[in-house]
Protein backbone atom coordinates (compact mmCIF):
# COMPACT_ATOMS: atom_id res chain seq x y z
CA UNK A 1 0.00 0.00 0.00
CA UNK A 2 1.54 3.28 -1.00
CA UNK A 3 1.83 6.21 1.36
CA UNK A 4 0.06 8.64 -0.97
CA UNK A 5 -2.95 6.36 -1.30
CA UNK A 6 -3.19 6.09 2.48
CA UNK A 7 -2.79 9.85 2.87
CA UNK A 8 -5.52 10.69 0.37
CA UNK A 9 -7.93 8.07 1.67
CA UNK A 10 -7.49 9.36 5.24
CA UNK A 11 -7.96 12.95 4.08
CA UNK A 12 -11.15 12.08 2.21
CA UNK A 13 -12.46 10.07 5.16
CA UNK A 14 -11.77 13.01 7.50
CA UNK A 15 -13.76 15.38 5.33
CA UNK A 16 -16.64 12.92 4.92
CA UNK A 17 -16.77 12.25 8.65
CA UNK A 18 -16.80 15.98 9.35
CA UNK A 19 -19.70 16.35 6.90
CA UNK A 20 -21.55 13.52 8.65
CA UNK A 21 -20.95 15.16 12.03
CA UNK A 22 -22.28 18.46 10.67
CA UNK A 23 -25.45 16.73 9.40
CA UNK A 24 -25.90 15.07 12.80
CA UNK A 25 -25.53 18.43 14.54
CA UNK A 26 -28.22 19.91 12.31
CA UNK A 27 -30.58 17.05 13.15
CA UNK A 28 -29.70 17.34 16.83
CA UNK A 29 -30.68 21.00 16.86
CA UNK A 30 -33.68 20.88 14.52
CA UNK A 31 -35.05 17.44 15.39
CA UNK A 32 -38.82 17.65 15.75
CA UNK A 33 -38.97 14.90 18.38
CA UNK A 34 -36.77 13.74 21.20
CA UNK A 35 -36.28 10.37 19.50
CA UNK A 36 -34.75 12.11 16.49
CA UNK A 37 -32.39 13.98 18.76
CA UNK A 38 -31.27 10.78 20.53
CA UNK A 39 -30.65 9.09 17.19
CA UNK A 40 -28.68 12.12 15.97
CA UNK A 41 -26.62 12.08 19.17
CA UNK A 42 -25.91 8.38 18.65
CA UNK A 43 -24.76 8.96 15.08
CA UNK A 44 -22.72 11.97 16.20
CA UNK A 45 -20.70 10.06 18.78
CA UNK A 46 -20.09 7.20 16.34
CA UNK A 47 -18.84 9.68 13.73
CA UNK A 48 -16.63 11.39 16.30
CA UNK A 49 -15.22 8.06 17.39
CA UNK A 50 -14.43 7.08 13.80
CA UNK A 51 -12.87 10.48 13.19
CA UNK A 52 -10.55 10.00 16.16
CA UNK A 53 -9.65 6.51 15.01
CA UNK A 54 -8.74 7.71 11.54
CA UNK A 55 -6.80 10.61 13.07
CA UNK A 56 -4.91 8.11 15.20
CA UNK A 57 -4.03 6.11 12.10
CA UNK A 58 -2.87 9.27 10.32
CA UNK A 59 -0.68 10.53 13.17
CA UNK A 60 0.34 7.10 14.55
CA UNK A 61 -0.44 8.28 18.06
CA UNK A 62 -2.01 5.90 20.59
CA UNK A 63 -3.75 8.71 22.51
CA UNK A 64 -6.46 9.07 19.87
CA UNK A 65 -7.37 5.40 20.24
CA UNK A 66 -7.82 5.81 23.98
CA UNK A 67 -10.01 8.88 23.44
CA UNK A 68 -12.09 6.96 20.89
CA UNK A 69 -12.58 4.15 23.41
CA UNK A 70 -13.79 6.60 26.05
CA UNK A 71 -16.18 8.23 23.57
CA UNK A 72 -17.55 4.81 22.59
CA UNK A 73 -18.18 3.77 26.20
CA UNK A 74 -19.73 7.05 27.32
CA UNK A 75 -21.77 7.37 24.13
CA UNK A 76 -23.26 3.90 24.51
CA UNK A 77 -24.17 4.44 28.15
CA UNK A 78 -25.69 7.87 27.49
CA UNK A 79 -27.71 6.62 24.52
CA UNK A 80 -29.04 3.71 26.58
CA UNK A 81 -29.94 6.06 29.45
CA UNK A 82 -31.68 8.54 27.14
CA UNK A 83 -33.62 5.76 25.44
CA UNK A 84 -34.73 4.32 28.77
CA UNK A 85 -35.74 7.78 29.94
CA UNK A 86 -37.84 8.32 26.82
CA UNK A 87 -39.53 4.93 27.18
CA UNK A 88 -40.30 4.96 30.91
CA UNK A 89 -39.76 8.50 32.12
CA UNK A 90 -37.08 7.50 34.60
CA UNK A 91 -33.53 6.23 34.32
CA UNK A 92 -32.97 4.52 37.67
CA UNK A 93 -35.69 2.23 38.95
Image (cartoon, helix red, strand yellow):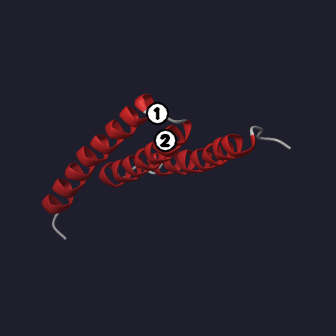
Question: Disc 2 on helix, strand or loop?
Answer: helix
* Quadrant location of the N terminus in the rendered image: bottom left
**Mark 2 Cα shell of 10 Å, populated few (<14), some (14-19), many (≥20):** some
Q: Position of residue 74 (x, y in %)?
A: 61, 44
Quick one: which residue is furthest to the bottom in this view? 1
At x 49% / y 48%, what residue is drawn?
68
Q: Position of residue 34 (x, y in %)?
A: 55, 36
Question: Disc 1 on helix, strand or loop?
Answer: loop
CA distance separating discs 1 and 2: 7 Å
At x 57% / y 45%, what residue is drawn?
75
Please state which of residues 90 and 20 is positioned toward the viewer in this rendering.
Answer: 90
Disc number for residue 60: none
Please state which of residues 44 and 68 is positioned toward the viewer in this rendering.
Answer: 44
**Mark 1 Cα shell of 10 Å, populated few (<14), some (14-19), many (≥20):** few
Disc number for residue 32: 1
Q: Position of residue 10 (x, y in %)?
A: 24, 54
Please state which of residues 22 and 48 is positioned toward the viewer in this rendering.
Answer: 22
User: Toward which corner of the image does residue 90 lie, by quadrant?
Assistant: top right
At x 19% / y 55%, what residue is drawn?
7
Q: Position of residue 18 (x, y in %)?
A: 30, 41
At x 46% / y 33%, what residue is drawn?
32
Disc number for residue 36: 2
In the displayed structure image, the side of residue 4 where residue 46 appears, left or right: right
Q: How many marks?
A: 2
Q: Are marks 1 and 2 in contact (CB under 8 Å)?
A: yes
Please state which of residues 23 and 9 is positioned toward the viewer in this rendering.
Answer: 23
Closer mark to the observer between disc 1 and disc 2: 1
Amino acid sequence: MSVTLLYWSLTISHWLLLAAMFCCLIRLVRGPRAQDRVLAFDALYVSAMLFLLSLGIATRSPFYFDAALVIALLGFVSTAALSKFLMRGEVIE
